[in-house]
Image: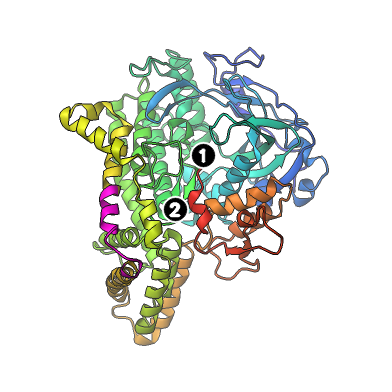
Amino acid sequence: MSATLETLNFDNSCLRCLPVESNTEIYSRTVAGACFSYVQPTPIDNPQLVVVSPSAMALLDLSQYELERSDFVQYFSGNLLIRGSRTAAHCYCGHQFGYFSGQLGDGAAMYIGEVLNRKGERWEIQFKGSGLTPYSRQADGRKVLRSSIREFLCSEAIHPRCQCCQHVLLFLSGNDQAMHYLGIPTTRAGSCITSDSEVLRDIHYSGNLIAEKATVILRIAPTFLRFGSFEIFKPLDKISGRMGPSVGRKDILIQLLEYTIKTHYPHIATKYADNDKRRYLAFFEEVVKATAKLVALWQCVGFCHGVLNTDNMSIAGITLDYGPFGFLDVYDPDYVCNASDDGGRYAYINQPEICKWNLNKLAEALADVLPTKESEPALEKYDEWFKKFYLEKMRLKLGLIRKHLSGDEELVKSFFQVMKDTGADFTNSFRLLNKLRISAPEESFSETKCGLVSQCTSLKDLKRRFKPSMPQSQLHMLISMIQANPDLITQMGQTALRIKNDLEKLQRLQDLNDLTEDQKRQSDHVLWGQWLKKYLERLNVEVEGLDVNFLKSADNERIDVMNANNPRFILRNYIAHNAIMQAEKGDYTEVRRVLKLLQNPYASQINENHKTLDYYHKAGKSKSDSRTFDYDGLPPDWSHELRVT
């Protein structure tokens, strides 16, 4: 039976089981000895529904009828309190860009409560952008329309329609097979509601403030507890000079840890009920394993988080806190989606190692109850688990479903190298591999090669992508300083990494300067032809001993698997930006259309037209001067200049 807005089944265990500070005033402060602070949402003027996800809201047992109620926007903007809810803000700390930042907390988010649905699943719901909390610091606790649309669409985009989060819960309870059916574990987005209330933002960091619409989204997850939740007990950090607000409170650390295990890892609580240390170790091991699988899945779809600080890492192994994220267009291992990440700390290629670094910080946060010497072996399993999950997924993406060979890893690496050398589109290149057929090798080989070459960027664009991030004069000056004093490199931190990356780009740029566009295209044909020959040889090994009459069915089986693991549609930055441009004019149809499309990312046949108007190009032009682009095509030229911070 469905619930109504008045009968949601709340069971707010966080506030019942964890300490909440007694001070209910709203002003920025250090919150010691507590995990939560009571707060109230700040109302917004004239709330308007931008978009809603019925599948996400169904997790709360809410039917379509409830979503269409006239007062729906009042409840899910925070203007009206939902019966049974209890609003609070969570206190946590974090290592940001490698340095401990002390207390952070829910500066723009609010815990609303935990809903137990009719399946017995527990879903924590949270507002983002609902106003001031004790953790807002100098900010206003608000989010704007553009960032809210991005988070809403990406939360739903990387969550397939196969009840992904339900499988996350099953995984947390020890059923690893359930993970087989996942896309990417993530928080969900239930609704996005904007308003006539305005906030000021300096979007270009130029000192010129503009007014934007205050917007609230509803986020849904098994839990919003994160690595940083356990860092509130951290003693004085010698580098940053900061400490957690509840340093020395081992009693609260144990309370938080026991609550987390009992509520979200109940199988561990049961199995090791009489052994505290073994219970804590088993918890840490599962977080390590879940994180390894999560980042492996990110890498396999070309997803970059952008801000992989410890306060943005979930203890449930789900994608948390969407900010300046991005999906790869042209494959570039050094791709940095966050324009504020000057040193490239959170570049695509660095994500696996950064997640391991964050897990080490979680181990340090638990050291009072689980010494790091005892948690270290579990952390060292991370690399093994990541490789296992990554290769499993890559074999599915390449259609290597019958045999696992030792050379498969090298085949994958060589595929990535050719994508890099040719500037090929990450998503479309994987998808095009389904054109190659063992039952018709000659004609399909040519078709596949031409398709892959068509996804390679131009020489002009490739040169642009390899342009160093700093002026050459500055780069050469820094190199001279390091040569004169090698010890400087250890003091430069992220700048040293930036120098290394820029030197590699400069070398690549010099190589490209000797090419013409025609030579580049000819080289693309050669490189893809060479790789496809190796790939076809590997596919033939798959069907060795198979009757020739069954080759077509083997092809179809392989292609079905590949199509289910290589998305056709992803939320590229330009697709999100195109929808945002219309939404900021009060037209939300493109946002809703993109959501509908992204709910079927692997579809070969879709009812929805996969072309849309290019609103960026159309802006400021006559109505007759309009262009379209394909959601699954190469990005338009204007998208190359998009920057997200």
Is 288 displayed left or right of 167 in the figure?
left
Q: Position of residue 413 (x, y in %)?
A: 29, 58
Q: Position of residue 116 (x, y in %)?
A: 65, 39
**Furthest residue toward right:** 70
- Inspect the magenta stretch and tell me whether residue 217 lies in it: no
Q: Amino acid at mark 1?
A: Leu
Q: Amino acid at mark 2?
A: Leu
Image quadrant in which you'd find residue 86: top right
Is 188 displayed left or right of 640 in the figure?
right
The magenta stretch spans which residues?
A: 506-519
Foreground pick, 419 / 643: 643
> Can the viewer see residue 257?
no
Foreground pick, 58 / 452: 452
Q: Position of residue 556 (x, y in %)?
A: 45, 76
Foreground pick, 317 / 106: 106
The numbered disc on residue 301 is none
> Can the viewer see residue 115?
yes
Image: 422 above or below 85: below
Residue highlighted by disc 2: 328
Q: Residues within 10 Å of mark 1 (few under 14, many from 20)?
A: many
